[in-house]
Image (tube, rainbow, N blue to C red):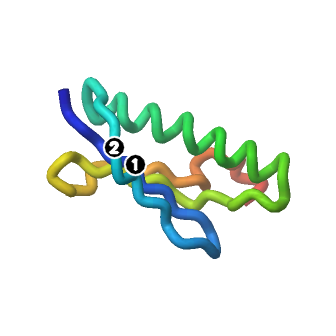
């Protein structure tokens, strides 16, 4: 099973590198996990004004190749952007 790394970027903060990674069935499963993580990060930022505001989660494969990016803006309704 492939190993993926989900690196998180926030506005006005240093990126958080996923040093351990995780095993997923495929890139789609890794993207689903990143999407769920993005929803949770956005919810935390809404509930707590001190929480960091997420910008994107970038998915890398085990060789270090970027395979997909989950953008926070894709989870915000158009009229709120």
Residue 28 % position (x, y): 33, 32
- Dot 1: what SS? strand
Q: CA distance from mark 2 to mark 1?
A: 7 Å
Residue furthest front in the image? 20
The residue drawn where x is 69% and y is 61% is: 52
Q: Which residue is mark 1?
A: 6
The part of the image, by quadrant, that contains residue 36 is top right
Residue 68 % position (x, y): 34, 49
Position above or below: 43 against 24: below
Q: Which residue is mark 2?
A: 21
Observer-nearest of 3 and 77: 3
Q: Which mark is residue 62?
A: none
Dot 1 crowding, Cα within 10 Å, few <14, some 14–19, many 20+: many
The residue drawn where x is 58% and y is 44% is: 38
Observer-nearest of 15 and 55: 15
Circles 2 and 1: CB atoms closer than 8 Å: yes
- Asked whether, in this view, residue 12 is left or right of residue 68, the answer is right
Total numbered badges shown on the rendered structure? 2
- Asked whether, in this view, residue 12 is left or right of residue 25, the answer is right
Residue 34 % position (x, y): 47, 40
Q: Where the N terminus falls, by quadrant?
A: top left
- Asked whether, in this view, residue 55 is left or right of residue 3, the answer is right
The residue drawn where x is 48% and y is 61% is: 16
């Amino acid at each position: 099973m492939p190993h993926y790394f989900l690196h998180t970027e926030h506005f006005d903060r240093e990126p958080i590198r996923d040093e351990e990674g995780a095993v997923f069935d495929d890139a789609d499963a890794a993207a689903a996990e990143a999407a769920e993580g993005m929803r949770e990060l956005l919810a935390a930022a809404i509930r707590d004004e001190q929480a960091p505001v997420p910008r994107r989660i970038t998915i890398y494969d085990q060789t270090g190749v970027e395979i997909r990016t989950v953008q926070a803006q894709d989870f915000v309704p158009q009229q709120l952007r």
